[in-house]
Image: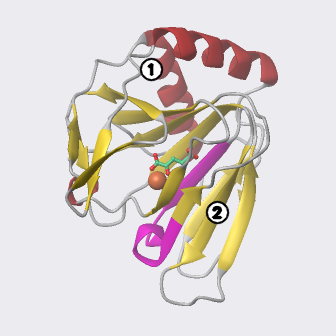
Amino acid sequence: MDNRDTDYLDLNLPDSEIYYYPHFLNTDEADRYFDILRTTAPWQQDFITIYGKKHPQPRLTALFGDKPYSYSGLTMHPEPFNSELLDIKAKIEGATQLEFNTCLLNLYRNGKDSNGWHADDETELGKNPAIASLSLGQERIFHLKHRYDKTLKHKILLEHGSLLLMQGSTQHHWLHQIPKTAKPIKERINLTFRVIR
Ligand SMILES: O=C(O)CCC(=O)C(=O)O
Ligand SMILES: [Fe+2]
């Protein structure tokens, strides 16, 4: 984690390496990317299979990159990166000194949309995956809980234009989620840059 060029906060949670960059993009840049991605990304409604039953995912998704990505019993096929995503990817790679080849986008349309407890630990992500997660639009709370030590929990507000980086052994020891909220809220777009092998 050397060579950083942006202000960040180390969450300092045990068994993890999680860093939060509150102002990774300025408000104008973040507004512009939100508008472009909201209108141009190929948003799709996927269905996940839980105990043999199909459910609509409580959010829309889009995949960019060059390799398909499979999780929760579904396989997504990517579009090639567009120029906006290439610019964002380059900025994230510059700040983190990491490289990414895939971006999974999530669109949370309102407070009923969510992302349940999970770890990003699919085999094609490799042993200790780095995941760089950019937030645009409505701020939402991100929950973390330790898989084995039930006393370890954390909440962080993911602001417009912020970046959350999870790496090292984080996915082995922690689960994360974006919970639903009853508040009337606006749309949020989340971009998770990953490496798919
Ligand atoms: O929306 C977020 O901030 C989290 C997304 C996430 O955890 C995922 O796509 O794996
Ligand atoms: Fe995740």
Residue closest to the eye, 52 or 154: 52
Residue in view at x 72 percent, y 42 percent: 6
Task: Indicate the amino acid at tag 1.
Answer: Leu
Label 1 to label 2: alpha-carbon separation: 28 Å
Residue 143 marker = 2
Q: Of helix, strand and loop, which one carries label 2?
A: strand
Relative to 123, say whether 194 is above or below: above
The amino acid type found where label 2 is placed reads His
Whether residue 72 is visible, yes or no, is: no
The correct choice, above or below, for 9 with respect to 192 in the image is: below
Circle 1 SS class: helix
Q: Is residue 171 above or below residue 74?
A: below
Left or right for 106, reference 30: left
Upstream in the sequence, badge 1 or badge 2? 1
User: Label for residue 86?
Assistant: 1
Q: Is residue 9 magenta?
A: no
174 inside magenta stretch: yes
Left or right: where does residue 164 sit relative to residue 6? left
Residue closer to the observer: 17 or 147? 147
- 54 to the left or right of 184: left
Question: How far across and down, in percent of the image, does residue 187 sit?
Answer: 66, 28
Label 1 neighbour load within 10 Å: few <14, some 14-19, many 20+: few
For the record, the magenta segment spans: 163-175
Q: Return the residue nearer the eye: 161 or 40.
A: 40
**Tags 1 and 2 touching, CB below 8 Å:** no
